[in-house]
Image (cartoon, rainbow, N blue to C red):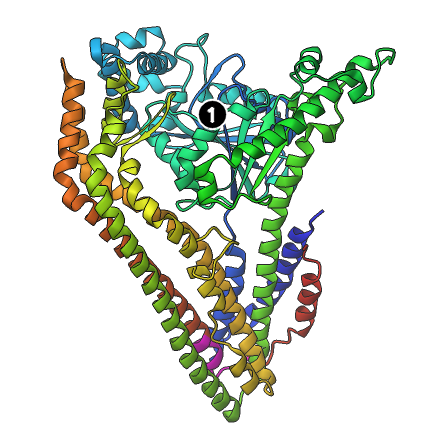
Amino acid sequence: MCLCFLVIRNGQMIMGHVKHKLSKYELQDTPTNKLIQYVREIITKLDTTIKKKSTVGVFGKTGAGKSSLINAILGETDLLPSGTLCACTSVIIQVGANLTDFNYTAEIEFISKKEWEDELKMLLNVLSEDGEEKDNAIFSTANEKITAMYGEEGVFMTIDDLMKDDNFSEIPEFLRSQTKKLTCEKASELSDQIGCYVQHDDSNPGGCYWPVVKSVTINVPYCKEFLEHILLVDLPGTGDYNKSRDQMWKSKLRECSTVWIVSEINRAGSDKEAWELISNSVGDMAQGGECSSICFICTKTDDINPQNYMRSSKLKDEDFQITPVDSQYASKKKTACILHRNAKAKEKVKKNVLLQDQIKTNFDCDDDFFSVFTVSSEEFTKEDPILKKEETEIPKLKDLLRTYNNSHTNEMASQYIAGALGILSLIQGFKEINAEMVEKKSSLYQDLEINLQNALGHLHECCRQICSSLEELLSKGAKESEEKCVETANQVIAPKKDGRGFHRTLTALCKNDGFYRSKKGTTDLNSRLASHMLQYINEAFSEFFPVQGKATEKSLQAKMVKFTIVNEEVMVKYENSPVLRHMMKFLKIEEMKLKKMLKQKIVEQKKTFYASLPESIKSTLLQGYRSAAAITGIGSMKKKQTELLEYIESSKSYMFQKAKREMIEMMDRTMHSTVEEIKTGLKASMEYSLLNTNTLSFMDVSKETEELKKLSTQICD
């Protein structure tokens, strides 16, 4: 068990004691007051520098067993509602640990009233259309949403009647744009209460509120050891015409450091939908995200007919070393078949991943990146299972989450203790001051200032080279995009395989500004138009801005790792001065903290860089989308297609050049700001530690330093 959280807590107690000792002197009217305030502030910042939670995205179609899987991992049979009796919706569900008490809580985030009004207008239009404009799937979704919220009479009401506040009396938080909070003592109670916010129930028309829900975040007690720093996010594989949920879906996908693909074992080897979902999302996971591993989880392994399986696999009792005379023959036979199929499924899925060109091109598909699990939630939770707990592989997934969580805690503990030791070194460095020491400090400051300028110059040059290389590739991509944009757009807005019913999909695409997620999948015209430019930069972009922990030599992160102002030459020059050794240690640690914080920031920024191409194209085509969406009547689908194609044709000469320019300008501006942030942070630390003539002679922190050093040895590997 990782005890790093105890290391952090004990470290905080030690630094709290140091802070308290400093406060005794802060109230006195002395020249050291400003220095004391600075030291107290950086101690406080140690507590606020908290790494964001790691996100595990869980993909899978309805019925794949996602809810049962998450429930089994949490040790709760009745928490997440399953899609067995009621249809699951496209509401995003997030699950984390409740660290404050032993209750089960949920926070429900709603879309805005204006968003719902706009969507209602569209839904009513869908229900009123006929002929070529009618799409049965979208018609069904529109009817489902209105009936869920208002009952069967809702489809006959006007928009004004539907938007009356009285209709939302059960969810006043929606009207006030607030989050609704639920608290229960039992998991089953919370499950009952959140059902109407995440599921469609035909037996309860007018009592389901999921159409206006953006996301539900559930916090569960008793799972701190594997979910304290982890967020499990159930990402619906399909959408339902809601722009707000679609945007959140993309945003959450980009946050995933790990993705779990959930599929029933009997279709795991041939589940095209699962692989298509991942392949279509690769850009948002790799260059546009931070995914560093994928797990393929085959569920329902206990759902097997041993007789049929053995016959189809040409297996006999002797192969499993079982015999009918054994009193436990039936259970041993089923267990053997389950484990045999599990092994075969793992082999097949691992072979399949090597056939996925998009995944192979954008990720290193080694054992660290891709793994396969075969699980049985049913067997894990049964009172009389035939499988051992470890054979259900639920414990393996819990261990995996525990590893993620421990790694997160370990990093935080290392960061905290290193930062705390750096602050104590600073205090030790202010134990005494005289004219000679002031001169030596000034000399060190001047040497570090020269080093800072040189190191910043190297970083600026690295940033310039990154922008220059990507600009050259983007120029080639922009030229190809201009040549092929009409052909590319035609594949999206006039596909040959879609006949009757595509009109409504096209309208939805236009009304959602070129991006539409439905029960049939995702259509993204903006990304398709940007695809040629993205293909040109993908390889270089991955090298310049890799996922954390996999920095290449060309990457900005690697250059930042090498960045230092307290180099070996400086350390040797001033090694005979205990005071200056303390100051250099403080500055080295401040440098490390700053670089670590900015490396995390770069991972976030690169998502924005990558997304800027389709976003820029969307902004250029916005008027075209709106004009096409407004076209109605007989023959309107053809007119919509013509309007869009003509708008793309007339915009192509500047649209892709504009997207290129905006991306490069954003990168240049952001990376320059990052370098300046390093400069500002280090200059401030240098000035406080080396140009300050005050002392903290009253502070003896040698005991605290030894205590922190002991704690550092307890940090988990």
Judge whether residue 46 is colored magenta: no
- Left or right placement of residue 560 versus residue 666 in this view: right
Q: Position of residue 91 (x, y in %)?
A: 43, 26
Q: Position of residue 488 (x, y in %)?
A: 25, 34
Q: Residue at x 14, y 40 (%)?
A: 651
Q: Residue at x 49, y 77 (%)?
A: 689
Q: Position of residue 175 (x, y in %)?
A: 33, 27
User: Amino acid type of disc 1?
Assistant: Lys
Residues packed near mark 1 inside 10 Å, few (<14), some (14 to 19) or many (20 plus): few
Query: Within the image, what quadrant is residue 249 found in?
Result: top left
Q: Which residues are magenta?
A: 686-695
Along the viewing direction, whichever of 97 and 39 lies nearer the viewer: 97
Q: Residue at x 87, y 14 (%)?
A: 326
Q: Is 160 placed above or below 618 here?
A: above
Q: Is 662 placed above or below 210 here?
A: below
Image quarter (top left, top right, bottom left or bottom right) of the C terminus: bottom right
Residue ID for mark 1: 272
Query: Within the image, what quadrant is residue 132 found in?
Result: top left
Judge whether residue 693 is colored magenta: yes
Q: Is 284 placed above or below 624 here?
A: below
Indicate the secondary structure of the residue bearing disc 1.
Answer: helix
Residue 108 appearing in the image: no
